[in-house]
């Protein structure tokens, strides 16, 4: 079966995604971009990526920022949440809607 969604992290925590049917990869930081490129060529559309890899995949995110796919979702898989993923969602919603609906008064 062809995967459209995969999860990538740097330790075994990412393997929990296997239990809900999402193929998971435990990778070293220097392997991440190579693996993502290979998966994009196999038509993977959504990457769930550990927040601690944000700086590693930044060039890849920039390359595809104006494309509908791939989508990179940053989540705290390997460590305590840093808020990077939440902030990205906030920015994307603000861009799409035109206002910051998450703004606290």
Image (cartoon, grey):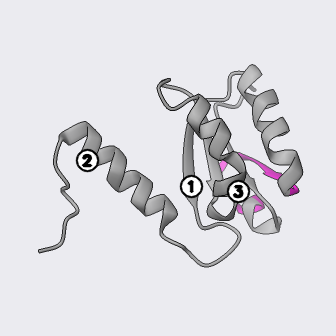
Kindly state the secondary structure of the residue where label 2 is placed.
helix
Mark 3, residue position:
19
60 vs 84: above or below? above
Q: Earlier in the sequence, mark 1 or mark 3?
A: 3
Does any portion of residue 14 appear in the rendered image?
yes
Residue 101 place in picture, x, y as percent = 18, 56
Q: Earlier in the sequence, mark 2 or mark 3?
A: 3
What is the C-alpha distance between the residues marked 1 and 3? 19 Å
Q: Is residue 42 visible?
A: no
Crowd band around label 1 with a 10 angstrom C-alpha radius: few (<14), some (14–19), many (20+): many
Find residue 48 and report its horizontal and vertical position in percent: 62, 49
Measure how far apart labels 2 and 1 are at the Cα level: 17 Å
Please tell me which residue is depicted at 20% across the width and 55% down the height of the picture.
100
Task: Assign the C terminus to one quadrant of the image.
Answer: bottom left
Tell us which disc is closer to us: 2 or 3: 2
Secondary structure at badge 3 equals helix
Magenta run includes residue 75: no
- Magenta stretch encompasses residue 17: yes
Q: Which residues are magenta?
A: 15-28
Total numbered circles: 3
Q: Mark 1 against mark 3, which lies toward the viewer?
A: 1
Check the image and name the residue furthest to the bottom: 80
Q: Which residue is mark 1?
A: 74
Q: Which mark is residue 94?
A: 2
């Amino acid at each position: 079966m062809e995967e459209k969604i995969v999860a990538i992290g740097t330790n075994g925590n990412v393997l929990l995604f296997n239990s809900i049917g999402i193929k998971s990869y435990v990778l070293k930081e220097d392997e991440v971009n190579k693996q993502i490129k290979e998966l994009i060529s196999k038509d993977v559309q959504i990457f769930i990526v550990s927040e601690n890899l944000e700086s590693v995949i930044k060039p890849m995110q920039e390359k595809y920022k104006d494309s509908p796919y791939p989508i990179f979702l940053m989540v705290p898989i390997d460590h305590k949440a840093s808020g990077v993923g939440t902030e990205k969602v906030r920015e994307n919603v603000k861009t799409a809607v035109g206002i910051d609906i998450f703004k606290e008064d």
